[in-house]
Amino acid sequence: MSNYKIETKCIQSGYTPKTGEPRVVPIYQSTTFKYDTSEQMGRLFDLEDSGYFYTRLQNPTNDAVAAKICDLEGGVAAMLTSSGQAASFYAIMNIVEAGDHIVCASAVYGGTYNLYAHTIRKMGVEATFVDPDCSEEELNAAFKENTKAVFGETIANPALVVLDIEKFAKAAHDHGVPLIVDNTFATPINCRPFEWGADIVTHSTTKYMDGHASAVGGAIVDSGNFDWEAHKEKFPGLTTPDETYHGIVYTQKFGKGAYITKATAQLMRDLGSIQSPQNAFLLNIGLETLHLRVPRHCENAVKVASYLKGHEKVAWVHCPSLEGDPYYDLAKKYMPNGTCGVITFGLKGGREASVKMMDSLKLAAIVTHVADARTCVLHPASHTHRQMNDQELLEAGVQPDLIRFSVGIENADDIIADLEQALVQV
């Protein structure tokens, strides 16, 4: 559906029913799929034929929804995972081995930081974290001979740092590695990282894509633009024979689909972080209104941020779409139609005042979530980023008093009134 506008793709992409078939994407709630002969099944296991035999690897419901997300991002292939965290893990582990190294922007979600700083280190993969605002010289200095990928977030959670995608893409490509960008907060409605040089995009579909806090999930999309064969010595998993599949070479057999095919056939086969068909079905319902919800989130966020900026008890406010924000210019470059519905702010009374204000909110709920239809609030230093020390918090752009406020799609006046009555209590 490459000729359609993104609004139409949100509704129509991924699934086209034939005569007499269900109008809505069916839920294929089955672990297995039947074949008439052993040879047919064997060809699927050898990757000689495409098809379905076990939902851990592929499922028609999941594939339809993945195809929609792929179309929204402008990629060539995509896959769903059980969570955004699984997507961040698979995206990197699909191209690294023990002894390898990655470069990562320091301003990322706390769970992602922990994954790359500690968990994959136990697997023999080292990460160097760089300030996303660093100079090109500083960024290039972070690379090593064994660097295999660069990772960053379009809009960092919760620091709201806007990644200079072109700067990071240039550095990655100058060193012969792909740039992987988590596009969860911006969504393809507001930013399509492939158009700015990114090679692979990940999502926590749990957030805006689902939109209703109903289903946890993740996605990985490949642009098909990175030439693995041109740097074949760096990526043997893609460019040399895989003996677990009778010696096939993914880049030779699957071309631009090599990266996602390997992630499905290898990582999903062995690690099994598949999204359930039921969750994929719920995700698709969310995607159908993504183009309607995201602009409302952004509009409300600017109104709320403007109100907070003028409040006497508020020390600071971050909203990339608000003029005067440190990332306003970058946001206008990469996301001219808006950034996201998440804003952050701190109170002059510090951490204690922040907690008291949050406890006084009535409409906004304190939940370990962000970016759905309902307004919610969190104190990252106490919750999502609790595992990070003070230095790591500062490197990730998380001040001790930072309040992450996810502005929903309710009436903005009601959200502001809730903040107003809560701030009176401080």
Image: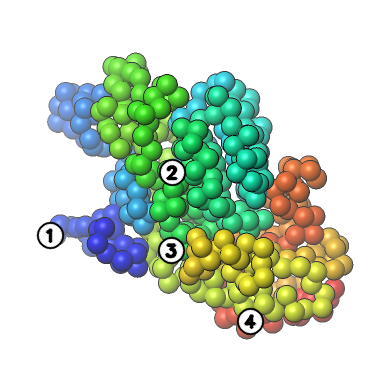
What label does residue 414 carry, if any? Answer: 4
Mark carried by residue 200: 2
In the image, which disc is placed on residue 38?
A: none
Along the horizontal axis of the image, is 248 left or right of 146? left
Q: Residues within 10 Å of mark 3 (few under 14, many from 20)?
A: many
Residue at 43 percent of width and 40 percent of height: 274
Q: CA distance from mark 1 to mark 3?
A: 31 Å
Residue drawn at x 50%, y 53% as measured from the top left: 183
Total numbered labels placed on residues in the image: 4
Residue 240 percent coordinates (x, y) = 35, 19
Residue 82 placement (x, y as % from top left): 47, 43
- Between disc 4 and disc 3, the foreground one is 3
Looking at the picture, which amino acid does disc 2 mark? Ile
Q: Which numbered dot is residue 189?
A: 3
* Callout 4 amino acid: Asp
Residue at (31%, 37%) from the top-left corner? 257
Which residue has dot 1 on it? 19
